[in-house]
Amino acid sequence: MPELPDVEGYRSSLARALPGRRVCQVDVRDAGVLRNTTPRTLDRQLAGHRFTDPRRHGKWLILPTDGPTLLVHSGMTGRPYYAEDDQPEQGWERLVIDLDRGQLRYSDLRKLRGVWLAG
């Protein structure tokens, strides 16, 4: 299971890439990682919003936008990361959020936790 330093590493990495990026489209490749929303609702709620500064609370990664917020709990094998447009996938990408530049990806082999939509 990712420990606090791992989650802080995810937050730190995303803090350099996400703020100001606008969500263009949400591609849910496996709805099994969504905990309180549907693929259609997630896309509709996030599209057009811009990410602000990521935060962490314990093992929760908080990814706010100027609208709703994504909450990510990585469980044992989940990993959110930013990828440039031409960067190959690393495997087990369950959720890909296309941004105005690059992508926010959530990769998870075992799907023990996942992604929530708040606000």
Image (cartoon, helix red, strand yellow):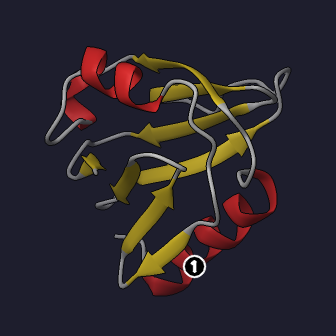
Residue at the far front in the pictured view: 66
| Quarter that holds the N terminus | bottom left
Q: Give the residue type at disc 1.
A: Glu
Is residue 71 positioned above or below 33 on the image? below
**Left or right position of 119 against 56:** left
**Left or right position of 62 against 89:** left
- Residue 87 position, x and y percent, is 81, 27
Q: Determine if residue 44 is in view.
A: yes
Q: Which residue is mark 1?
A: 8
- Residue 101 position, x and y percent, is 81, 29
Q: Give the camera-side residue of 100 and 90.
A: 100
Residue visible at 40% across and 52% down? 69
The image quadrant of residue 29 is: top left
Q: Secondary structure at mark 1?
A: helix
Residue visible at 52% across and 74% down? 55
- Residue 27 position, x and y percent, is 46, 16
Q: Determine if residue 93 is in view.
A: no
Residue visible at 22% across and 52% down? 113
Q: Residues within 10 Å of mark 1 (few under 14, many from 20)?
A: some
